[in-house]
Amino acid sequence: MNVMHRQVGMLGAYVDCVTLAEATQRACEFIESGLPHQVVTVNVDFVRQAQKDKEFLGVINRSALAIADGMPLVWASQWLGDKLPERVTGVELVEQCCSFASEKNYRVFLLGGEEGVAQGAASVLTERHPGLQVVGAYSPPIGPFSEEEDNKMVRMISEARPDILLVAFGAPKQDLWISTHQHQLSVPLALGVGGVFNFVTGRVKRAPSWMQDRGLEWLYRVIQEPGRLWRRYFVQDLPVVTRLLFVALQLRIAALFLAPMTVLQPQPEVMEPLTSQLPAATTHYHSDTTT
């Protein structure tokens, strides 16, 4: 069945307009289809990296599902006039996937993280979700993968035959790796999950609920890991948020000029110079032909 899903563009990277419940339902449908699907957890840093890495941008936009894993993207969508319904974090989606996997006897494989972290996350998830079948957990060496290591991981996953693959290499490495190997693996649902294993095991604490609700989880993370995250959030990612705000202002200003002109039915030679200056459309529809 060919199903159309609405997406919002963030400087060329498209994010699905879904709630956590809708994302979970889509994930279930992907597994039921039996065909390979990739899910990406987009945040501001994804958008920043995708500006420089067109291969990564292509992976985001070809993915079966791209969730908004960060409140700044929800705020930006509101500025752009096409609000995303809510933030859908990778942690929450992983927990939901493990919940329905335990009920439906789906098989899960955890790949990535520092040594022992995938195994630790597997233990915690099986305790939280009785009946969950974890058919593999492996943390490869840190750094670029050799061809031998690549082949080893593909072989391990293929032999385990999981329905759900959780890959924690960090972005864009995890997402590019899934895209490269998904048809060899034939896993119905493959998610790049970043630091989710660290949150699951408690190595990194999530912000209190009141901070999450107010979109301040990023600040809590900076306080926890200032050496690693200060530069990323304030030096690298802040200009992306500023650029999104600037695009939103362009759209608002253009709307003020174009709205009355549209009523007056102006000639094309009047409209063309104005419309050519507008940013690219922020909304489009993504077709999923496998669900």
Image (cartoon, rainbow, N blue to C red):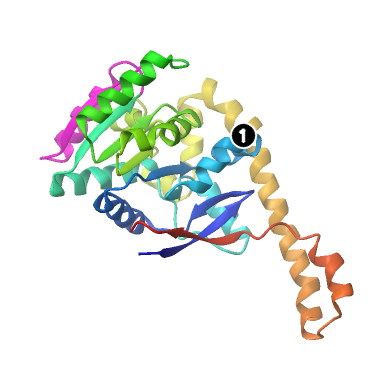
Q: Splitting the image into 4 quarters, where does residue 155 fall? A: top left
The residue at the far front in this view is 184
Residue 131 left/right relative to 50: left
Three-letter residue code for mark 1: Asp
Position in image of residue 186 (x %, y %): 30, 38
Position in image of residue 139 (x %, y %): 32, 19
Residue 91 left/right relative to 254: left
Residue at screen point 30% across, 39% down: 187
Residue 224 left/right relative to 36: right
Residue at screen point 43% across, 17% down: 145
- Camera-side residue of 169 and 187: 187
Position in image of residue 125 (x %, y %): 21, 35
Above-or-below relation of 276 to 93: below
Q: According to the image, label 1 marks what residue? A: 53
Whether 115 is among the magenta residues is: yes
- Camera-side residue of 162 and 239: 162
Above-or-below relation of 122 to 22: above
Above-or-below relation of 83 to 182: below
Q: Which residues are magenta?
A: 113-141
Q: Is residue 44 visible?
A: no
Q: Splitting the image into 4 quarters, where does residue 126 fall? A: top left
